[in-house]
Amino acid sequence: MAFASLHDFLAMGGHGLYVWLSYGLVVTGVLLLIGQTRAGQRRWLREQRRQLARQRARATVSGDPS
């Protein structure tokens, strides 16, 4: 489908509102999913570091060299 101008492209034959809202919702959903995944990963890594530090502290107190 060819468009005569940028305005015609954005209007999408009268369906532009629905088309661009759909694209916007999908992009927003994907960005939220990426953000949520990265936050969960950072949270998991932080917890793993804390757990490792606790294990090392316990090993130091008990005299275990490992």
Image (cartoon, helix red, strand yellow):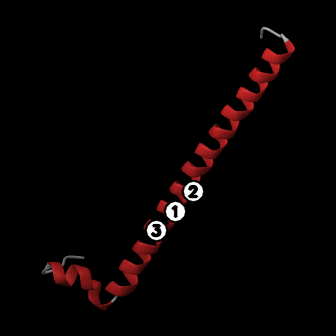
Disc 2 marks which residue?
Answer: 36
Mark 3 or 2 closer to N-term?
3
- Is 36 positioned to the left or the right of 27 in the image? right
The answer to whether 28 is drawn above or below residue 20 in the figure is: above
Q: Kindly identify the amino acid type of the residue bearing the numbered disc 1.
A: Leu
The answer to whether 51 is drawn above or below residue 4 in the figure is: above
The answer to whether 45 is drawn above or below residue 39 in the figure is: above
Disc 3 marks which residue?
Answer: 28
* Residue 66 sits in quarter: top right
- Residues at circles 3 and 2 in contact by the CB criterion of under 8 Å: no
What residue appears at the point 49 percent right and 62 percent down from the top-left corner? Answer: 30
**Numbered mark located on residue 32 in the image:** 1
In percent of width and height, residue 56 lies at 75, 21
- Residues at circles 2 and 1 in contact by the CB criterion of under 8 Å: yes
Q: CA distance from mark 3 to mark 2?
A: 12 Å
- Is 3 positioned to the left or the right of 47 in the image? left
User: Dot 1, crowdedness within 10 Å: few (<14), some or many (≥20)?
Assistant: few
In percent of width and height, residue 35 lies at 52, 56
Q: Nearer the viewer, residue 4 or 31?
A: 31
User: Dot 2, crowdedness within 10 Å: few (<14), some or many (≥20)?
Assistant: few
The answer to whether 56 is drawn above or below residue 48 in the figure is: above
In percent of width and height, residue 48 lies at 69, 34
- Is 15 positioned to the left or the right of 26 in the image? left
- Residues at circles 1 and 3 in contact by the CB criterion of under 8 Å: yes
